[in-house]
Image (tube, helix red, strand yellow):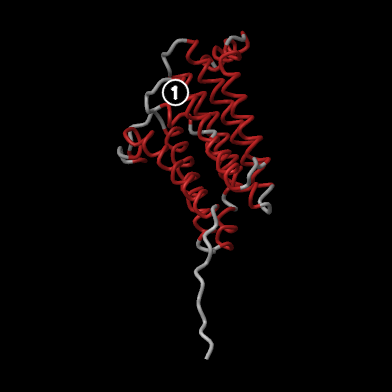
Amino acid sequence: MATMVARAPRVRPDDVFFPAMVLLILGIVFTGFSRTYFLAGMMRAKLPNTLVHVHGAVFVSWILLLVAQPWLIVTHKVKWHMRVGVLSLIFVPSMVILGVLTLFDFIRRSPSDEGFLKLILIGDLEIITLFAVLTSWGLLARRDAASHKRLMILGTIAIMGPAIDRWHFGIPATLGITFGLPLLVLAYDLCVLKGVHRATAVANALTALWVLTLIPFAKLAFWHQCVQWIRHA
C-alpha cells in the first residue's frame, strides 16, 4: 500500500506581510486616538460636534474593513472578500467628503495662528487627495491582486498623519514617519520581487511629493485667502 503524505500548504510571503501591514495601521490609529476616542467610549467620546463623530465612525469602519480584507484572502474566503469589498465604493467617496468638511470645521473652530492653519489645510488636502487617488486606482485594479493590495494599503497609509501627529513627536517626526511607512512596502518589494512594483513606486513618489511641497506651498498667498474664506464662510 502506497503511503500518502499530506503536504502543508505553502505560506506565501504576501499572506504574512500584508496582514501584518494592516495590523500595523490599526495599531497606529488606535494608539493615536486611544485617549480622545477609543478609550473615551468612541461614540460617547467628548468630540466637538456631530460631524466629527460621524467622521470618526466612518474612518474607523474603513480601517476595520482594511484589516478584514487580507485575512479573508489568507483564510481562502475570496468570495466574502469580494462581497465585503463592495463597501469600499461607499467608504472612499464618503471619507473624502467627510475629510474635507471636518478639516474646514477644525479651521473655523481653531484659535491657532494662520501659519499653522495653512499647514493643516495644505497637508490635509494633499493626503485626502492622495488617499482618493490611490484607493480609487486600487478599486479599478481589483482584478490585479498585486496592485490592488498595495494601493489599498498605501492609500490608507497616506491618511495616517493625524493619528501619528497625536503621538506629539512634532511635525518633522510626523512627516518622517508618514513618509517612512510606504518605504516598508518598497523594501518588501525589493526583498520578494527583486524590484519595485509600479503601484509601490508611484505611491512612494506621490508621498514624497506631498512631504516636499508642504512647506513651499504654505508660503503662497493663495492659502492665506483660503484660510480667511473658510474662517468667515
Q: Is residue 16 above or below residue 175?
A: below
Q: Pick the residue in front: 37 or 183.
A: 183
Left or right: 20 in relation to 187: left
At which x and y percent is residue 182? Answer: 55, 35
Give the percent coordinates (x, y) of residue 173: 44, 23
Instruction: Tell me which residue sits at (52%, 36%) in the image.
Output: 157
- The residue beneath circle 1 is 173
* Kind of residue at disc 1: Ala
Q: Is residue 38 left or right of residue 199?
A: left
Q: Label 1 neighbourhood size at 10 Å, few (<14), some (14-19), many (20+)? A: some
Residue at 59 percent of width and 35 percent of height: 131
Residue 228 in the image: above or below residue 92: above
Which residue is drawn at the image coordinates 56% and 23% (left, top)?
211
Q: Is residue 34 above or below residue 172?
A: below
- From the top left corner, tell me how far across and down residue 19 is, in percent: 49, 50
User: In the image, residue 150 lies at what x, y percent?
Assistant: 60, 44
Picture quadrant of residue 171: top left
Residue placed most toward the observer, 186 or 151: 186
